[in-house]
Image (cartoon, grey):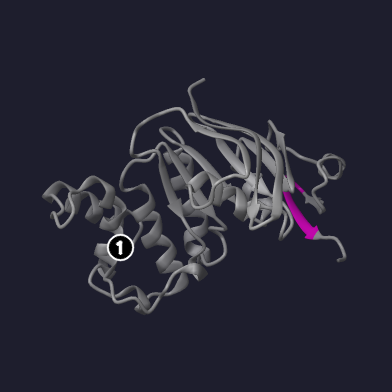
Amino acid sequence: MTKLLELKSLYAGYDDKVILRNVDLIVNKNDFLGIIGPNGGGKTTLLKVILGLIKPFKGSIKFNNADDNLIGYLPQINTIDHKFPIPVREVVLSGLMSHKKLFGRYRNEDKEKAKGLMDQMGVLHLRDKNIGELSGGQLQRVFLCRAIISDPQILILDEPNTYVDNNFEAELYTILNQLNDHMAIIIVSHDIGTICSHVKSIACVNETLCYHDSNIINEDQLKTYNCPIDLITHGDLPHRVLKKH
């Protein structure tokens, strides 16, 4: 296996508060990892460490490839400034910002690639609209285009189901399964029933990280991982409810 990312004995948090303790994780080429856990358990902190937004207190994070295209990121849509006056086409192209010179122009092939992705995601007709005019589901499609336009080796998605419309949800996972043929995918979600149908492995994050090398997980295993989520199974599709808290 080709190792893309490795975290060893990692501690991280904010100011003097430790959120993550002694975290070990390896992400290999073509992994499809689902990250679950309670609110406040450290999922967002883990993503920030991987994205380089915060530095760990101790331990190490190592990227085993010098390629600038290592990570593509789809954030939670509610964290985006919808009032910022930028058209859809520029949002998508901004995923290539690190590849062009300062004040340089995007190449014609970049624009054609952006056009093709927007067409694939069903937002080509919105290319001249400002992002503030879009629905949550439309924004999700646009920012997915932005995340993958550079052909990253790891695609990270933070709660992608939150604003996806019903018509796009099944299509989203079809697209992710296709993308997984040539990139690793890390998806953070509370919707364990949905992601278990698509991911290859699961990481339970609740201050520490417990890795489960399968997409099949039961309630006893979650308790062992100190991950306070209950599972209820209906047919072949698992659903979950949160315990009383």
Q: In this figure, which residue is indicated by the disc labeled 1? A: 91
- Outermost residue, front side: 16
Amino acid residing under circle 1? Val
Q: Is residue 126 magenta?
A: no
> Mark 1, residues whose alpha carbon is within 10 Å: few (<14), some, or many (≥20)?
some
Taking 102 as reference, is 67 above or below it?
Answer: above
Between 100 and 178, the residue placed more toward the observer is: 100
Residue drawn 26% across the image and 70% down it: 87
Give the mark count: 1
Residue 227, horizontal then vertical, whole percent: 79, 48
- Please tell me whether mark 1 sits on a helix, a strand or a loop: helix
Rendered position, 29 above or below 107: above
Instruction: Please state, as top left, top right, bottom left or bottom right, where the C terminus lies in the image.
Output: bottom right
Determine the image quadrant of residue 125: bottom left
In the rendered view, would you say 24 is above or below 219? above
* Segment tinted magenta in the rendering: 235-241
Tell which of 114 and 7 is nearer to you.
7
Predominant secondary structure in magenta? strand
The outermost residue toward the top is 1
The location of residue 188, given as percent across then percent down, is: 60, 51
Relative to 135, 191 lies left or right: right
- In x, y percent, where is residue 28? 52, 28
Image quadrant in which you'd find residue 81: bottom left
Q: Position of residue 131 (x, y in %)?
A: 34, 73
Q: Quadrant of residue 239?
A: bottom right
Residue appearing at x 63%, y 34% in the figure: 25
Q: Nearer the viewer, residue 62 or 153?
A: 62
The residue lying at 48 percent from left, 41 percent from top is 177
From this view, report whether residue 121 is shown above or below residue 196.
below
Q: Nearer the viewer, residue 173 or 132?
A: 132
Horizontal side of residue 40 vs 79, given as left or right = right
